[in-house]
């Protein structure tokens, strides 16, 4: 990757973290400090000194994700509209809007930005449903991928923000639900 390309990814990653911070999410770092108490504090889950001192330490978040999934399932929401941004580190930031009725995606709109480097990453319809995002969290946990940000909606339990943390790339995966609406 060229220096300009790496700079673009670094800036996009930084913008994502700034956006996440402004939305009250926990951002954990080398200092082990946490943000607002309403968000999921991954540092509180850390049980080893390594997890508190290195950016690539894995903290098992699967139990908290399982609790949030149960909360989501108990809410019984089958029809909703959501808008999210997604980046997996190999293309431009993806903007995804979808409508789910009775658990099935009936509408999907997909854009990317900034336009100058825009490349739409192929996606499956079910990937960005709420159950699909929970599956992504399960995959990341199974691969022991560290997370810098993990936040769930307090009312319904859906995953609201996920950002991986790795020395391998500025950002490997980032998902931020920008808006969520239950449909009747």
Image (spheres, helix red, strand yellow):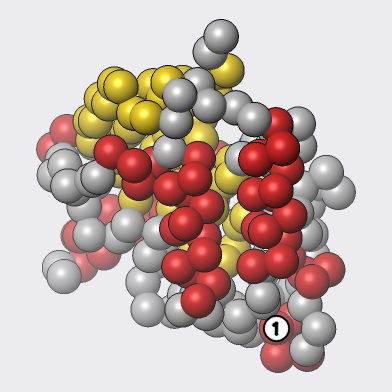
> Measured from the top left, where is residue 119 in percent x and y?
13, 44
Q: Residue at x 64, y 49 (%)?
A: 69
> Measured from the top left, where is residue 167 in percent x and y?
44, 79
In the picture shown, does residue 102 fall above or below 140?
Answer: above
For residue 107, say whether it is visible: yes
For residue 16, say whether it is visible: no
Residue sitting nearer the eye, 69 or 55: 69
State which quarter of the image contains the C terminus: top right
Task: Classify residue 67 by image quadrant.
Answer: bottom right
**Residue linked to disc 1:** 51
Q: Residue at x 66, y 39 (%)?
A: 72
In the picture shown, does residue 87 fall above or below 155?
Answer: below
Task: Classify residue 112 by image quadrant.
Answer: top left
Q: Residue at x 49, y 45 (%)?
A: 131
In the image: residue 132, left or right of residue 61: left
In the image: residue 57, left or right of residue 106: right
> Measured from the top left, where is residue 31 in percent x and y?
75, 73
> Measured from the top left, where is residue 48 in percent x and y?
78, 89
In the picture shown, does residue 59 fall above or below 184?
Answer: below
In the image: residue 159, left or right of residue 145: right
Residue sitting nearer the eye, 183 or 166: 183
In the picture shown, does residue 10 fall above or below 184?
Answer: below
| Circle count | 1
State which quarter of the image contains the N terminus: bottom left
Q: Residue at x 46, y 79 (%)?
A: 143
Q: Residues within 10 Å of mark 1 (few under 14, many from 20)?
A: many
**SS at badge 1:** helix
């Amino acid at each position: 990757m060229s220096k300009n390309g790496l700079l673009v990814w670094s800036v996009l990653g930084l913008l994502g973290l700034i956006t996440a911070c402004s939305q009250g999410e926990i951002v954990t770092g080398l200092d082990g400090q946490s943000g607002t108490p309403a968000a999921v504090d991954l540092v509180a889950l850390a049980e080893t000194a390594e997890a508190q001192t290195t950016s690539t330490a894995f903290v098992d978040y699967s139990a908290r994700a399982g609790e949030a999934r149960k909360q989501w399932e108990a809410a019984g929401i089958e029809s909703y509209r959501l808008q999210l941004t997604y980046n997996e580190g190999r293309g431009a930031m993806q903007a995804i809007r979808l409508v789910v009725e009775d658990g099935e995606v009936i509408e999907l709109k997909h854009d990317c930005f900034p336009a100058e480097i825009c490349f739409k990453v192929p996606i499956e319809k079910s990937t960005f449903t709420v159950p699909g995002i929970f599956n992504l969290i399960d995959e990341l946990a199974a691969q022991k991928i560290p997370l810098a940000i993990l936040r769930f909606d307090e009312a319904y339990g859906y995953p609201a923000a996920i950002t991986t943390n790795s020395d391998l790339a500025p950002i490997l995966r980032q998902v931020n639900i920008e808006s969520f609406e239950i449909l009747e």
